[in-house]
Amino acid sequence: MKATSGISFLPSFSQSLAGIQVVVIFAVCGVLTGLPAFQVLAQAPSQEQIWDHELNRWLTPEELGHLEIYFTEEEAAKVMFPDSEKIRKDTLTLAPEQKAFVEEVIGWKFPETTFDVFIGETRGNIDGYALIQNTIGKHRPITYMVGVDSTGECSNFEVLVYREARGNEIATKRFNYQYQGKTIADPIRINRDIINITGATMSVRSASAGVKRVLVLVNEFYLKPRGLGSNVMAASKSEKGFLEALFGL
């Protein structure tokens, strides 16, 4: 009977000890955060943490939630085609082989198979094209619109939504004017034909890669069918390696 009594006592003691430990954890959480411990423990698994290697620290919740909205899609389209009589919206859908071709030309793989395209028209003539892009910056995606004129040159670049805590200079004209006049024949690369922004290198590289993609998409699927496009060459091995590293491929 004593043995039986001893066995029944041990689980009870362990349960009590575990209970004390839980109480201590709750108390410590409350002291450290200033919040009810149950609230902290419930929220912890869902909180995103991103380490910034340049800052050498975790990003704060404010930085992670940073959001700057400059234009809606419709507003940006009007900026792209200020003199067009009308602006219509098209959807470009790529077949697997078309997507593979574009990836080979620009040197990096992307998940999208459809793109929203705004087309400016005046008296039946096409003034240009503008595509919405979402490419990852340093930590978050950047939403921007790239305009291409009827000859295949980049006519404008406008940031719609910027989600990084730093580097929003890419939304300014003194930076994004650099893309104007670029064609599929241009590198569109930092330190080659694009000047970098200190502290926003990843955002600049991402935006530049997106501009290149738009120029290729417009050339292949809008200009060439009208007999206006140019032939493009696949990206070199060095370019592919660079962009694969950039996008984590």
Image: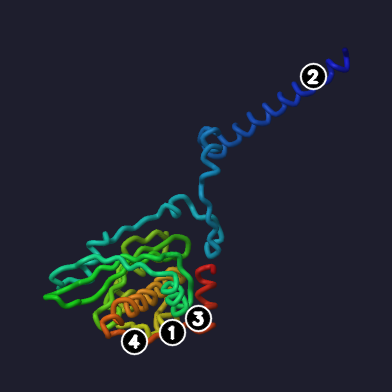
Q: CA distance from mark 2 to mark 4?
A: 84 Å
The x and y percentages for residue 102 are: 42, 76
Q: Residue furthest top?
A: 1
Residue at x 68%, y 31% (from the top left corner): 21
The type of residue carrying mark 2 is Phe
Judge whether 11 appears above or below 48 on screen: above
The type of residue carrying mark 4 is Ser
In the image shown, does 71 or 229 lie closer to the viewer? 229
The type of residue carrying mark 3 is Glu
Circles 4 and 3, Cβ within 8 Å, touching? The answer is no
Name the residue beneath numbered marker 2. Answer: 9
Name the residue beneath numbered marker 3. Answer: 239
Q: Residue furthest right?
A: 2
Circles 3 and 2, Cβ within 8 Å, touching? The answer is no
Counting residues from the start of the chain, the first of labels 1 and 2 encountered is 2
Q: Secondary structure at mark 2?
A: helix
Name the residue beneath numbered marker 1. Answer: 192
Q: Quadrant of residue 181?
A: bottom left
Counting residues from the start of the chain, the first of labels 2 and 4 encountered is 2
